[in-house]
């Protein structure tokens, strides 16, 4: 069945790689994620956001996840698969997921005051651990797509808080903010400007204060330029879309970062191939055709991430 994150994180921290955490909302995404991870022998976290629950129905997604475990086993693969709630925003939501069979949850109290974040996270941990469900907490706020200037530095994780936070809350992993953000427009670059490096100095300081503790990196899509190019070529409009360069993700994966969240790259892969397919096959109307093309690209993307970026391939 589904497993929590404890063992996979322990092995990843010791092994200098990161477990991929892919978001899913539909059948083709889930088939691609679990199929590609089975083929590359990678442990995997499949995660469901609040938006995914609203879109696809929580019960449906949970049974799909259990079906995906069976699919992997039928493929002859024994990879560990964790079903995780992404960005839980209340005790009630986390409780509902624990009660229904998720093996891991995130409580994102990063927008609250420090003390309120501690209290809420602690409450979720107490409830979840009683059912052997692991919990991810968060300190520091990821930059939003729109806000830029707003005291850039104050939103990074404060290393001086992490030791107290993990001790008081009992969380199993900690999401941090070191310069990434969600979505496809992570950095506003001026003409000829390079993507600024992530704040590895903050990560190093966090690692020094809580050695060996599992760290999570959100907003870790590379915003693959090939996909942005295809989207723009076939009628889309995504000027200025930019993500985290692979080299920086490789470096993060080799550090205490042991979970890397990827959603946007999968969305881009699907959109690129669907746009291309429909443009090139105007008479086609069978969704299996264009979703099949999208799924094929997703499999390629996920294998590449596991093998060449996160280093999780072969670690199951
Ligand atoms: O953290 C955000 C994830 O990419 C999920 O996004 O809320 O649109 O499903 P979503
Ligand atoms: P991306 O938008 O960079 O894929 O980040 C996804 C994420 O952090 C989900 O929690
Ligand atoms: Na790591
Ligand atoms: Zn996130």
Image (cartoon, rainbow, N blue to C red):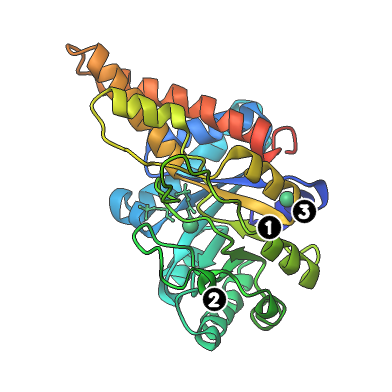
Of all residues, the one furthest to the left in this rendering is: 283
Looking at the image, is 42 positioned above or below residue 272?
below
Does mark 1 have its CB less than 8 Å from ligand 3?
no
In this view, the mark in front (3 or 2)? 3
Question: How far apart are labels 2 and 1 at the CA level?
Answer: 29 Å
Does mark 3 have its CB less than 8 Å from ligand 3?
yes
Mark 2 neighbour density, 10 Å: few (under 14) some (14–19) many (20 or more)? many
Residue receiving disc 2: 124
Question: How far apart are labels 3 and 2 at the CA level?
Answer: 24 Å
State which quadrant residue 24 falls in: top left
Residue receiving disc 3: 13
* Helix, strand or loop status at disc 2: helix
Q: Residue at x 63, y 71 (%)?
A: 129
Residue 80 shows in the view: no
Task: Return the residue nearer the eye: 10 or 146.
Answer: 146
The disc, 3 or 2, on the residue closer to the chain's N-terminal end is 3
The picture places residue 119, in percent across and down from the top left corner, at 55, 85
| Quadrant (top left/top right/bottom left/bottom right) for the C terminus | top right
């Amino acid at each position: 069945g589904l497993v929590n994150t404890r063992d996979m994180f322990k092995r990843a921290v010791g092994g200098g790689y990161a477990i991929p955490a892919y978001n899913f909302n539909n059948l083709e995404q889930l088939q691609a994620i679990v199929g590609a991870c089975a083929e590359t022998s990678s442990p995997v976290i499949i995660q469901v956001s609040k938006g995914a629950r609203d879109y696809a129905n929580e019960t449906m997604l949970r049974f799909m996840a259990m079906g995906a475990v069976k699919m992997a086993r039928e493929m002859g693969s024994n990879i560990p698969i964790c079903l995780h709630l992404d960005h839980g925003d209340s005790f009630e939501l986390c409780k509902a997921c624990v009660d229904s069979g998720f093996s891991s949850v995130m409580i994102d109290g990063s927008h609250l005051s420090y003390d309120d974040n501690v209290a809420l996270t602690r409450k979720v941990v107490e409830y979840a651990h009683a059912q052997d469900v692991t919990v991810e907490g968060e300190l520091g706020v990821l930059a939003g797509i729109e806000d830029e200037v707003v005291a850039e530095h104050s939103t990074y994780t404060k290393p001086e808080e992490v030791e107290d936070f993990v001790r008081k809350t009992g969380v199993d992993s900690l999401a941090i903010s070191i310069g990434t953000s969600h979505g496809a427009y992570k950095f506003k670059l001026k003409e000829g400007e390079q993507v600024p490096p992530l704040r590895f100095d903050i990560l190093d300081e966090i690692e020094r204060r809580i050695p060996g503790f599992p760290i999570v990196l959100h907003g870790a899509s590379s915003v693959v330029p090939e996909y942005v190019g295809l989207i723009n070529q076939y009628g889309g409009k995504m000027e200025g879309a930019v993500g985290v360069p692979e080299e920086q993700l490789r470096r993060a994966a080799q550090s205490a970062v042991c979970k890397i969240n990827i959603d946007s790259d999968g969305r881009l892969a699907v959109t690129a191939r669907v746009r291309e397919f429909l443009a090139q096959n105007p008479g086609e109307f069978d969704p299996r055709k264009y979703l099949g093309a999208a799924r094929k690209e997703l499999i390629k993307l996920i294998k590449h991430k596991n093998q060449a970026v996160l280093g999780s391939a072969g670690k199951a």
